[in-house]
């Protein structure tokens, strides 16, 4: 991937899937742009915004791999912010080869009848509309190069195996998969492939939050829920962020030239229950 330029959204958390993807692509020679919302507007204005510092730390770690790394604040739900992000990539690198739509949220779990309207809208906005906006505004830069490219959308196994109390998240990720399949056909003629990954249980802060939530709901301890979930995974462990990152790296590589419009489960063989 020498000299290819990759943009990864939602990559500001050390230990998150986005940062692992960025590091893995950097280790294979790509130049990396990482972006993240870096918290609320008020926090954005703070001089020492910890989320912004963490994003910059991830960028510094990437640079130890030898390539360039650029950290940008961008809110994927805001078209102006996404366009500004893409324009920075154009100004700094003049090209874009790989787009990884990783930014995502899971909020306000609960039955549909009790779900705040705002939680439904926000989840669809970040996960589905955010992916749409990044594709919409980044693809023209990828097309400019006439070298083809890769779009990889981080959806979730929830898109195919929705659990109760997670309707907004599951619906938003199903939208990402449908967007993937439709867009793949639109841009295939330009040698751009579009694929989705469907991670299952990946050991990140988001997953820890989910385990704690289930523990609270069932009156169990964190460890009891953790062990119970692992028992349902044939490979006997949660995924690590690197497991997802390696699949992204394969899809971004020349070995995956002929693969498009697909959604790949990364679940350790778990059949959802
Ligand atoms: P994570 O650490 O929370 O990463 C998601 C990142 O997206 C966070 O840094 C978050 O920033 C950022 N983000 C949220 N809203 C944004 C916005 N409007 N604009 C830009 N960035 C925004 O979670 P993760 O576990 O690494 O998840 C990464 C992706 O994998 C997500 O799409 C998630 O749905 C998907 N996934 C995860 C799992 C799992 O088990 N962990 C399973 C299936 C799919 P803040 O922290 O500031 O909100």
Image (cartoon, helix red, strand yellow):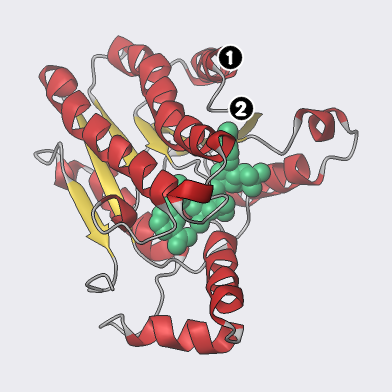
Q: Position of residue 86 (x, y in %)?
A: 50, 18
Q: Which secondary structure lies at badge 2? A: loop
Which residue is at 39% across, 49% downward? 167
To which residue does mark 1 refer?
Answer: 84
Q: Which mark is residue 184?
A: none
Q: Residue furthest front?
A: 113
Q: Residue farthest to the right?
A: 47
Cβ atoms at labels 1 and 2 below 8 Å apart: yes
Q: Label 2: how many residues lie within 10 Å, few (<14), some (14-19) or many (20+)?
A: many
Q: Is residue 172 above or below residue 243?
A: above
Q: Return the x and y of residue 99 as percentages of the image width and height.
A: 38, 32
Pick whichever, 232 or 137, lies toward us: 232
Distance from label 1 to label 2 (Cα)? 8 Å
Depth check: 224 or 246 in front?
A: 224
The residue closer to the viewer here, 239 or 149, is 239
Give above or below for 12 relative to 189: below
> In the rendered image of this protein, does residue 132 appear above or below residue 206?
above
Query: Mark 2 vs ligand 1: CB under 8 Å?
Result: yes
Q: Secondary structure beneath disc 1? A: helix
Q: Position of residue 179 (x, y in %)?
A: 26, 30
The tag earlier along the polypeptide, 1 or 2, is: 2
Residue on which the image places disc 2: 74
**Residue 62 left/right relative to 3:** right
Q: Nearer the viewer, residue 164 or 51?
A: 164
Question: Callout 1: few (<14), some (14-19), or many (20+) C-alpha neighbours within 10 Å?
Answer: some
Q: How many marks do you count on the picture?
A: 2
Q: Is residue 224 left or right of residue 246?
A: right
């Amino acid at each position: 991937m020498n000299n290819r330029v990759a943009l990864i959204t939602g990559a500001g958390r050390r230990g998150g899937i986005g940062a692992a993807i960025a590091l893995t692509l950097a280790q294979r020679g790509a130049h990396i742009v990482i972006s993240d919302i870096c918290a609320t507007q008020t926090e954005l204005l703070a001089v020492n915004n910890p989320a912004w510092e963490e994003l910059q730390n991830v960028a510094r770690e990437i640079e130890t791999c030898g390539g360039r790394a650029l950290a940008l604040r961008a809110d994927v739900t805001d078209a102006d912010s996404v366009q500004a992000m893409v324009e920075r990539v154009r100004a700094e690198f003049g090209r874009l080869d790989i787009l990884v739509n990783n930014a995502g949220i899971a909020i306000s779990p609960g039955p549909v009848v009790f779900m705040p309207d705002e939680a439904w809208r926000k989840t669809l906005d970040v996960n589905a509309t955010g992916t749409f906006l990044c594709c919409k505004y980044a693809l023209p830069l990828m097309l400019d190069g006439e070298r083809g490219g890769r779009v990889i959308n981080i959806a979730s196994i929830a898109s195919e195996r929705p659990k109760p109390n997670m309707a907004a998240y599951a619906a938003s990720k199903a939208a990402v998969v449908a967007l993937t399949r439709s867009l793949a056909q639109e841009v295939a003629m330009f040698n751009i492939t579009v694929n989705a990954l469907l991670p299952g249980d990946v050991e990140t802060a988001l997953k820890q939050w989910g385990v704690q939530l289930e523990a609270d709901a069932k009156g169990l301890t964190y460890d009891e829920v953790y062990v119970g979930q692992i028992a349902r995974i044939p490979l006997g462990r949660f995924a690590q962020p690197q497991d997802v990152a390696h699949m992204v790296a394969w899809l971004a590589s020349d070995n995956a030239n002929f693969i498009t419009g697909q959604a790949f489960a990364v679940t350790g063989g778990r059949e959802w229950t």
